[in-house]
Image: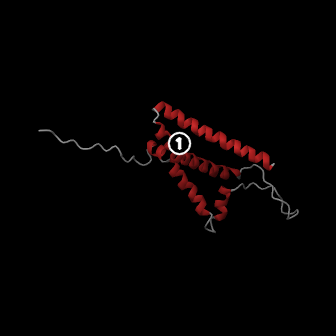
């Protein structure tokens, strides 16, 4: 008599907080953390606290002078919160580009594991270079 083998379940749920779970879902996890700061802007009681994470906050303008004078900012310890939030948004954008652009293209190319790893790394670097060039041109034009 032939024993009937069960179907292998290749779509296993990974245990939460395992290394593999964090790697596969890092974009979703970080976007949830970023949404906490964004929803904090909606509540009036938490809005000043959440605003420190969204915008630059190290102001050096004195209130004694001309009230029509523009606000001046410099680098300081209050910028650490804004840098942290920018890092979160960068991670989310990395995951979005990876999931919706680079993974779709790599599936159509049918690459091997080594070539797939090189493709993913190269595509992220090209995207970083393009965005850096656009940002640099914007700074040059605005200054």
Residue drawn at x 54%, y 53% as measured from the top left: 31
Q: Where is residue 52? Give x, y as percent.
A: 67, 57
Q: How is the image coloured?
A: secondary structure
Residue furthest to the right: 65
Q: Could you say which is closer to the camera, residue 112 or residue 40?
A: 112
Secondary structure at badge 1 equals helix
Residue drawn at x 31%, y 44% as measured from the top left: 9
Horizontally, residue 125 falls left or right of residue 56, namely left
Residue furthest to the front: 108
Q: Residues within 10 Å of mark 1 (few under 14, many from 20)?
A: some
Q: Is the residue 115 above or below the residue 62 in the image?
A: above
Horizontally, residue 99 falls left or right of residue 56, namely left
On-image quarter of the N terminus: top left
Horizontally, residue 96 falls left or right of residue 65, namely left
Residue drawn at x 78%, y 50% as measured from the top left: 74
Q: Which residue lies under the disc numbered 1?
A: 102
Q: Where is residue 28? Give x, y as percent.
A: 51, 51
Count of all numbered marks drawn on residues in the image: 1
Residue drawn at x 53%, y 37% as measured from the top left: 120
Q: Where is residue 134? Give x, y as percent.
A: 70, 45
Horizontally, residue 137 falls left or right of residue 81, namely right
Q: Is the residue 122 above or below the residue 91 in the image?
A: above
Q: Could you say which is closer to the camera, residue 10 or residue 100?
A: 100
Q: Where is residue 25? Give x, y as percent.
A: 48, 48
Q: Is the residue 105 above or below the residue 49 in the image?
A: above
């Amino acid at each position: 008599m032939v024993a009937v083998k069960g179907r292998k379940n290749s779509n296993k749920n990974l245990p939460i907080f395992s290394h593999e779970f964090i790697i596969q879902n890092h974009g979703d996890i970080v976007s949830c953390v970023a949404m906490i700061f964004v929803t904090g802007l909606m509540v009036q009681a938490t809005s000043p606290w959440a605003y420190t994470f969204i915008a630059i906050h190290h102001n050096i303008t004195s209130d004694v002078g001309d009230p029509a004078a523009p606000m001046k900012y410099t680098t300081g310890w209050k910028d650490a919160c804004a840098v942290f939030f920018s890092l979160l948004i960068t991670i989310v954008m990395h995951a979005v580009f990876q999931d919706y652009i680079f993974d779709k293209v790599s599936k159509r190319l049918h690459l091997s594991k080594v070539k797939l790893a090189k493709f993913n790394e190269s595509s992220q670097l090209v995207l970083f270079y393009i965005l850096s060039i656009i940002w640099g041109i914007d700074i040059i034009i605005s200054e």
